[in-house]
Image: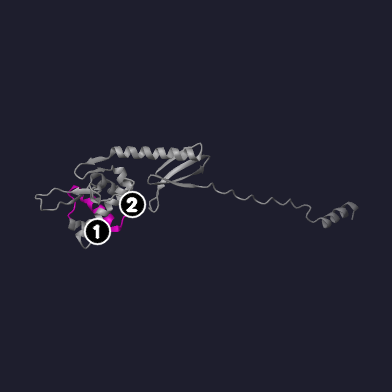
Amino acid sequence: MSTHVANKRADAVQDPFKKMGKAKKSAEKPKKAPAILLGEHSRYQIKSGWLAGTFVARAFPKPPTTARGMIAEATGATEEAAISALHEVIDAREDRRTGERRRDTQNGVDVPCVEEYLEAVRQVTLSGPQRAMLTALSLADEDGLTDARLAYAAGYKSEASANKSFAATGLLIAEYLFSGPQDDDAPGTPEGTAFLGFRGATATEEQTGNWILHPELRQAVRLAM
């Protein structure tokens, strides 16, 4: 065995890890996700933060609603600027909608547009019977329903219970759309049903007219079905 070969074998015995590559550096710890700032404006929840290279602010349905989907979005050079821009978008949207409301002189309410009603129907927490009443009335179209048929459609045993629930439905929608509780006990304040519809005409004053939804609400309920 030559001296050169012997030396190579000796080196291998003395340093068995010599030919192994250097240990890789430990993987870097993943960076924390940017914090999301939560806030509120009008009837919406605001979420803002750093996203895809810019500051973004978005408006969503405010809990406890189970509705999903983004309402509006804005960006800015800073997070504060993005939030401020989103507030302006929401306010402009609300002003436009308010201007589109139709005045119902008979009931004394400003009837929301289809777009507003649709948002409310999708986001307000209504019971099964309350949704059943709205659905039945939307399908009844301009003919409407008698108190008895409305109660039957929602599964109520009495017309009084159905009418009470119907009025409560109107107040919930009004509270959402008009950004505040509607107190039907206050003098001059319309009852909850006025935000949903009206009584149909009758041949005599002794008769009770059918419940008829506002055309805007009828269309919104059909779209939400």
Question: The disc labelled 2 sits on which kind of residue?
Answer: Val
Q: Relative to the observer, which residue lies in front, 53 or 7? A: 53
Q: Relative to the observer, which residue lies in front, 142 or 46? A: 46
Q: Position of residue 25 (x, y in %)?
A: 69, 50
Residue that lies at the very extreme toward the bottom in this rendered image: 157
Q: Position of residue 99 (x, y in %)?
A: 29, 37
Label 1: which secondary element: helix
Residue that lies at the very extreme toward the front in this rendered image: 187
Q: Position of residue 194 (x, y in %)?
A: 23, 48
N-term mark: 1 or 2? 2
* Left/right of residue 130 with respect to residue 4 in the rendered view: left
Residue 152 visible at all: no
Quadrant location of the N terminus in the rendered image: bottom right
Label 2: which secondary element: loop
For the record, the magenta segment spans: 122-146
Magenta stretch: includes residue 125 = yes
Q: Nearer the viewer, mark 1 or mark 2?
A: 2
Q: Position of residue 207 (x, y in %)?
A: 11, 53
10 Å crowding of disc 1: few (<14), some (14-19), many (20+):
some
Residue that lies at the very extreme toward the left in this rendered image: 204
Question: The disc labelled 1 sits on which kind of residue?
Answer: Ala
For label 2, the residue is 124
10 Å crowding of disc 2: few (<14), some (14-19), many (20+):
some
Real-space Cα distance between discs 1 and 2?
Answer: 18 Å
The residue shown at (13%, 48%) is 201
For label 1, the residue is 154
Identify the mark at residue 102; answer none if there is no mark.
Answer: none
Magenta stretch: includes residue 151 = no
The residue shown at (46%, 40%) is 83
